[in-house]
Image (spheres, helix red, strand yellow):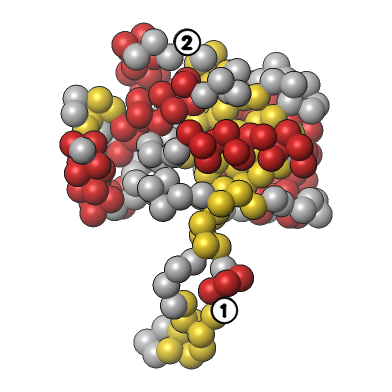
Amino acid sequence: MKTFAIIAAGGKGTRSGFFTSKQYLKFNKKELIAYTLQIFQKNVLVDEIIITADPSCFSLLEKIKKKYRLTKITNIIEGGKTRQDSVYNALISLKAQKKDLVIVHDAVRPFLPQDVLTKSINLAKEKGNAVVCIKAKDTLIKGKSFIESYLVRDEIYYVQTPQIFKHEDLLRAMNFAYDKKFYGTDESMLLMKINKKINIVEGAFINFKVTTKSDIELVKKLVKK
């Protein structure tokens, strides 16, 4: 059984307010995506890394690959119109067996702890899939201008990445979604559409998605430390 990691790096990052896509912003002279890629490079359970990106960034990614000796990168694939399209492009490019594992991870989650990654891969090997989530800690409400109701936070999770599935299951789920003209916000949502039970792995708050200017300021502080 092999384990492939798809790093989704096709987003434009408009919410960050920067001209450069946030995955290519530099922190301590290193691109954000390089921090992410090194996590998967270092993990002994990961066999190959595939990146989805805009073609205009291919040459930069090749330079990053060479500079940081990211030997597990086997392909850089053109991303699609949506995240789902990008992941699908990468998925069908893999020379994978049905039972091989496919990890999907956001390029802009550069602080994924190694123990969380290892734990999620091992659970997926055992049970067929794994999705990293964190439990809600704050009081949660439903409403717009006013509070309408309170949610039971013990039953609420924030979904993160990585998300890991058997190749055959993810491919089947994506084909089903396209057949139904359905676009999900993540891969686990697609697997639910084909009635797969999704296993939860406890994540970490440090594994946040860099989205806004305040996130970028936080990265600057964390990288300095």
Please provide percent x and percent y for residue 76: 49, 19
- The quadrant holding residue 22 is top left
Q: Quadrant of residue 118?
A: top right
The number of discs equals: 2
Disc with the residue nearer the chain's start (2 vs 1): 2
The residue under the point 51% across, 57% down is: 134
Q: Quadrant of the N terminus?
A: top right
Q: Say whether residue 76 is visible.
A: no
Residue placed at 46% from the left, 81% from the top? 141
Percent of width and height locating residue 99: 79, 28
Q: Quadrant of the C terminus?
A: top left
The amino acid beneath tag 1 is: Val
Q: Which residue is mark 2?
A: 71
Regarding residue 72, the answer to whether it shows in the image is yes
Marker disc for residue 213? none
Q: Nearer the viewer, residue 117 or 23?
A: 117
Does residue 108 appear to the left or right of 135 in the view shown?
left
Q: Which residue is mark 1?
A: 152
Percent x, y of residue 181: 70, 51
Give above or below for 159 relative to 28. Answer: below
Write the residue at 31% across / 11% down: 67
Q: Position of residue 23 (x, y in %)?
A: 34, 35
Name the amino acid, label 2. Answer: Thr
Check disc 2 and report its element: helix, strand or loop. loop
Secondary-structure class at tag 1: loop
Q: Nearer the viewer, residue 70 or 201?
A: 201
